[in-house]
Image (cartoon, grey):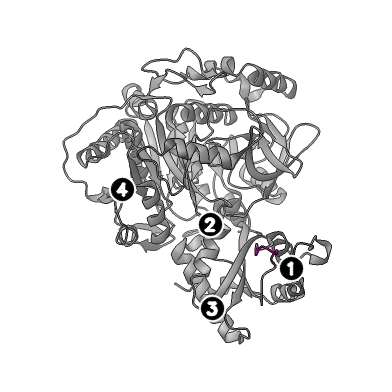
Amino acid sequence: MLLEHELAWVDEKIYWEIYENSLKYPNEFWMRHMQDISWKKSPEIAFDERSGRWLPGGISNVCYNCIDRHAEKTPDKPAIVWYGDMPGERREISFAELQRMVVRISSVLRARGVKKGDVVGLYMPMIPEAIAAMQACARMGALHLVVFAGFSAEALAYRLSVSQAKVILTVSAANRGGKRIKVLDNVEAAVVNMERPPEIINVDTLGNVELDDRIAWLSESDNLFVLYTSGSSGKPKGIIHSALPYILYVATTFKVIFDIKPNDVYFCTSDVGWITGHSYIAYAPLFFGLTTVIFSGSPTYPEADRYWDIIEREHVSIFYSAPTAIRSLQMFNRKFVERHDLSSLRILGSVGEPINRSAWQWYFDVIGGGRCPIMDTWWQTETGGIVLAPLRTLKQKPGVAGKPFFGISPKISDNGELTITSKWAGLCRAVVYECGVAGNTTEFCENIFRKNYFKDGAFLTGDGATQDANGDIKISGRLDDVINISGHRLGTAEFECAINKIDEVKESAVVAVPHDIKGQTAFAYVVSKTELLTPEAKADIAKKIVAATRCCIGAIAKPDFIAFVPDLPKTRSGKIVRHILRAIANGESYENKDVASVVNSRVLPDLQAAVHNSLHCPDMCKLK
């Protein structure tokens, strides 16, 4: 099934030849990789340039490609190897067993009235059943909506409500870092006040059900999932991906960038609640019949060698992780790495945020033994799959994402924003706001998507970037009001909404500041209703802010710094001047900035003093 892999080890000259042809003749390029898909009806072309449609006329099913065809040919091969919170907690699920798990869940969903096109919520820890549930939805043509199990009940309720989820799949509880998390309690708290609550289905207690192994054969216009991400416009937005073009793109990027072999053992440390967990755990590795290792615990519990222990035990050959995890593990004694044999590794990967040079070098030298290339990948929920990466043997540049993948045409705009001018199969098709995805709202959602993401025909990524003379692109970070905390994209409006609910708070503004481990963290400027606050009063409000952000978003959203200020810099129309707040929070002088639009510029010296005396919130992390 696997095609030859010459794309994975091309030199620079050949790369550019293939790359230019992929832009000039996209149909020919993608027709070749389209052959990896098992079709019910094969499309005659991969890309119709006139209509912009991908795989027109094609009929297939993502679950069949990921599960059923491998269950037929290699039923006993491990599909998923799961490691739990404690060493020794291990489960091995073969492709045949995974197929039975998928059929059982899809049968339960059908029995509860779920049909093709319905939305199914998932709020589950990183366990095999979560992947099986996603594949079960794909099998029957329902859209799965996976919500990261670290999000609060309030955040879960919003996503379920807006997407009009018919049911929600969950489990009773889970363990992480030695703590017992009552997952079902959070789901029940989320649906209790919803106007149209979804039915809760506990995967732990499915009971007996008449099995229905039907497969819904889908066309290129059918959708696969909704996944929420944050943006600068305020509330989280649901990104909708189509089934067949999406699987073509993620499978091809996975195959080429990671140079996969049939016997590879692949370990990605992401969670299925994020796009990495969708594209490069639940779908692409299973599409090629690889054994995929997943982990639901903490990398430092009970000791800081959980990743390295798993790599040694399972003979992992491809390891894909996040800079936050790499930086945190870099801080521990090297003995935690040296006690394990990591010689099975041949390729490393980084995802979620730009990786700094120090972490890159440690990753390459200590984990990869100086022999494993690092695929420093850049992409987004909206792009579906990897957009920038160094191919396997192209020259490695620490901290530089690398060259565009085939078919991707990047451009740096005048304001330093990375844009993409070409079309590609992985690009999402629509966005969910308050309109939902049911009924006749799809066209409206597509219009919102085009309006918010495109300018003069170019896709706007919202990320700043620079490109060197060799065509390699370095990502500098977000240009909009989004904070990337440990790879989790959170909108500043979400923080502010939670903080502004506190009785003592008049208004607030949240900006991103660098963090040595997380990459970025939240810095909150708070205007209290009382002008003069004692240190005790400030500490009390800060505790409430920590609790409020945990409650409304999740534990990952706690701001690390809080500054109490008399007012926020604003324009005449009342808009907060955020670039000034970002500059001051990052230790820059406002005197070097354009403050002409700030009507209350007298407050700027006070802001600088308040930042100097800001409260450091990790000291309050024990608060619940």
As for residue 228 lying within the magenta part, the answer is no
Chain part drawn in magenta: 570-574
Asked if marks 4 and 1 touch (Cβ < 8 Å), the reply is: no
Query: Is 534 on the left-hand or right-hand side of 158?
Result: right
Please name the residue shown 73% across and 24% down the image: 12
Q: CA distance from mark 2 to mark 3?
A: 35 Å
Residue 485 vs residue 281, the one in the foreground: 485
The type of residue carrying mark 3 is Ile
Which of labels 4 and 3 is toward the front? 3
CB of mark 1 within 8 Å of CB of mark 3? Answer: no
The amino acid type of the residue labelled 2 equals Ala
Q: Pointer 1: what residue? A: 599
Which residue reaches farthest right?
592
Question: What is the CA distance from the residue labelled 4 to the residue labelled 3?
Answer: 36 Å
Q: Residue 113, position in %: x, y?
A: 22, 40
Q: What residue sits right under mark 3 in the picture?
A: 541
What is the secondary structure assignment of the residue under circle 1? loop
The residue that label 4 is drawn on is 169
Q: Earlier in the sequence, mark 1 or mark 3?
A: 3
How many angstroms separate mark 1 from mark 2 (CA)? 51 Å
The alpha-carbon separation of the residues under discs 4 and 1 comes to 51 Å
Residue in front for this viewpoint, 581 or 345: 581
Q: Tell me, for residue 210, which label it has, or none.
A: none
Q: Image height check: is 314 above or below 323?
A: above
| Image quarter hosting the C terminus | bottom left
Can you identify the residue that label 2 sits on? Answer: 304
Q: What SS does tag 4 mark?
A: strand
Q: Is residue 619 visible?
A: yes
> Label 3 near label 2: C-beta < 8 Å?
no
